[in-house]
Image (cartoon, helix red, strand yellow):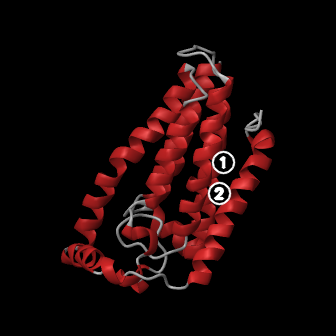
Amino acid sequence: MGWLEFAAAWAAFFFTHSLPLRPPMRPWLQTRLGQRGFTFAYSGLSLAALVWLIGAAGRAPFVSFWDWAPWQAHVPLVVMLPVCVVLALAIGRPNPFSFGGARNDHFDPARAGIVRLTRHPLLLALSLWALAHVVPNGDLAHVILFGVFAIFAAFGGRLVNRRRQREMGAEWQRLLTEVTSSAGNARPVSWVAVIVRVAIGVALYVGLIWVHPWLIGVSPLR
């Protein structure tokens, strides 16, 4: 039953991440929930599916690829801090090059923020999260789990690039050129805003360590 639950969790994860975004369904949901309501509902549903998927991986039959060693636990502890900071710097900021951007019509190439370092900060965070967590989880189910996310993050950027280029046309290349050409004059919207977002990232990191035993069933500090 463990493998069946793992397969069902994967099916639910892909279902909740793909169906609400399809053209017939997304406008229908946005009309009834509003843009903000749709975003919160979609994010909550996606998070619930992810939690189930991670839990199902832990309940799947254990097939070891490599032995666990104490040093491995330090890898996600170290890597997750920059992951949380990247998320805090990216979420809610304009980013016309990728998904997850907010108020993209207000994007200023001279104040691109983290978008200047990577057009897909959320995919970067996903990749680091997956690669860091596969180190102390060397069993088949978790290698599949984190491996799929790492592969998706590695190739997802190309898919998003093609999609955004198709949607934006010449505007995509124009903005990209402006972001690159304005690198010497780069400046944050506000240093206070940057400090606040970094502090939020650190708080998220601490919060994840605190909630991890309750949510996942394993303490990252042990």
In the foreground, 72 or 130: 72
Q: Residues within 10 Å of mark 2 (few under 14, many from 20)?
A: few
* Amino acid, disc 2: Gly
In the foreground, 174 or 186: 186
Q: Is residue 11 visible?
A: no
Secondary structure beneath label 1? helix
Secondary structure beneath label 2? helix
Residue 69 in the image, given as x and y percentages of width and height: 64, 21
What residue does disc 2 label?
44
What residue does disc 1 label?
48
In the foreground, 36 or 118: 118
Q: Is residue 65 visible?
A: yes
Q: Are marks 2 and 1 in contact (CB under 8 Å)?
A: yes
Residue 134 in the image, given as x and y percentages of width and height: 54, 32
In this rendering, position of residue 44 left or right of residue 147: right
Instruction: Specify the quadrant that holds the C terminus.
Output: top right
* Amino acid, disc 1: Ala
Instruction: Specify the quadrant that holds the N terminus.
Output: top right
Residue 170 in the image, given as x and y percentages of width and height: 18, 76
In the image, what residue occupies the spot 47% across and 64% down? 26
In this rendering, position of residue 36 left or right of residue 153: right
In the image, what residue occupies the spot 62% across and 45% down? 78
Q: Residues within 10 Å of mark 1 (few under 14, many from 20)?
A: some
